[in-house]
Image: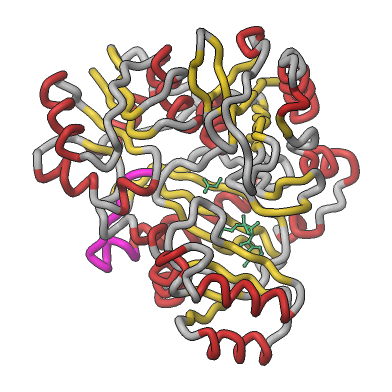
Amino acid sequence: MKVLVIGSGGREHAICHKLMESESVSAVYCEPGSDAISEVATCEGIDPLDFVSLVSLVKREGIELTIVGPEAPLVAGIVDFFQENDLLIFGPTQKAAQIEGSKRFAKDLMKQYNIPTAAYETFTSIQDAKEYIASTKGPYVIKANGLAAGKGVVIADGEQEACQAVESMLSGSKFGEAGREIVIEAFLEGEEFSLMAFVNGTTVIPLEIAQDHKRVGEGDTGLNTGGMGAYSPVPQIPKSVVTQAVETIMKPVAEAMVKEGRSFTGILYGGLMLTKEGPKVIEFNARFGDPETQVVLPRLESDLGVVLKNILGGGHVELSWTKKTVVGIVLASLGYPEQYETGTAIEGLSEVKGDSYVFHSGTKKQNEEYVSSGGRVVVIGAKGEGVKEAREKALRSLSTIQNLTNFHYRKDIGYRAIMFDDSSLFEYTQTK
Ligand code: AMP
Ligand code: GLY
């Protein structure tokens, strides 16, 4: 079958790559795609929000299945539009995508259905939010209600910093309309992990878990980013905890969405925290995670085309995985997640080979050479026996880039797994 992937980043590059390996897939299209993606898929550069042009591409080329990468087209209703045109698409409808599109909706749903998450309040008034902050203890977790490219969260230790965040969000100066309503929630302590699942109504098929590194600096310091690297599997999260998360979080939320008349189809992403009281939800996304997908999909041994078609058709699905570890390191533009320049050549990139791979997040081709075109530029990943070996291989591949000083990256991706291996200091994993 022919498959269309919507999106243009490293996540979509990884999805296209996996589809190309699938025997069931004869051709991959990606819109808008990128120069790098066009090496594995056909790209015409159609805007992901131009549903009419996408539908005509699908009809013209006889594409059987469409997969949506980013959240914006989902929240804008791409799935509804394709379904109205009788086309097969893997992703949630606009109503179901609200689980990511509105933090308040997600929090209210979890409260109503007793799905474990941090306690919270929502605000539209600066005054009310400030009074609430004054009446509670920090650290304060302040979130823009709408979509903010993974950057709509401020964790403030002190009251003053919290009030500043509240003001910049609610006044609309920081995230525009997405920040006109905010959620302030309790700070969760523990070990974070990402659990994605293929979902169709009440059917929930979990993928292997990963751990993202959201902070810009080594040892998880500095500003939040879209993610500076990830690895899978995550040895410090026991299998029993993953099972518990599927039973107490992923399945109940899928069932809740059906009961609410918002049946969810697609990838449901749980950003979870293993606390002393067990796993709790930090956030839900309505799509594949980025950069988690770049380390989870390379571990999938099943034919992704067959898996998706069977999930949509209600058939039997079993996933098979390599036991090897994949570590992926994000190479970012200097200055990211704040202001950065683009157009920097990535010298020596084509040298990366063997057990390593490169997924392009923000690059374009200029005079036969890849140059940066975004904050996160590429993910360099490698497979190995365990986190240490995989990370060493990824770092070795990275070092073939000749002008690394023009970028920045974290050398410590996977450090929590290595600490765990070395000392078993993780009290949170002792819950079961
Ligand atoms: P989000 O965009 O909701 O995933 O939040 C970004 C990051 O902020 C998460 O990956 C966590 O590391 C952190 N975070 C968000 N909410 C909380 C919370 N309630 N407690 C502790 N950390 C949080
Ligand atoms: N890695 C987190 C996300 O995709 O939102």
Q: Position of residue 365 (x, y in %)?
A: 49, 16
Residue 263 among magenta residues: yes
**Picture residue at 49% right of the left edge, 27% below the top:** 320
376 in relation to 80, above or below? above
Start-end of magenta stretch: 256-267
Q: Position of residue 39 (x, y in %)?
A: 42, 12
Q: Position of residue 238 (x, y in %)?
A: 68, 47
Q: Is residue 325 left or right of residue 51?
A: right
**Picture residue at 76% right of the left edge, 77% below the top:** 158
Q: Is residue 313 left or right of residue 141?
A: left
Q: Is residue 377 left or right of residue 218?
A: left
Residue 310 in sight from this viewpoint: no
Can you name the residue that lies furthest to the right here? 423
Determine the image quadrant of residue 256: bottom left
Count all numbered tags in the image, as a single digit.
0
Residue 193 among magenta residues: no
Question: What colouring does the structure picture have?
Answer: secondary structure
Front residue of this view, candidates 13 and 321: 13
244 in relation to 212, above or below? below
Front residue of this view, candidates 292 and 375: 375
Quadrant housing the N terminus: top left
139 in relation to 236, above or below? below
**Picture residue at 70% right of the left edge, 36% below the top:** 334
Determine the image quadrant of residue 397: top right
Quadrant housing the C terminus: bottom right
**Picture residue at 65% right of the left edge, 85% below the top:** 133
Q: Which quarter is ligand 1 in?
A: bottom right
Q: Position of residue 404 (x, y in %)?
A: 75, 23
Residue 16 in sight from this viewpoint: yes
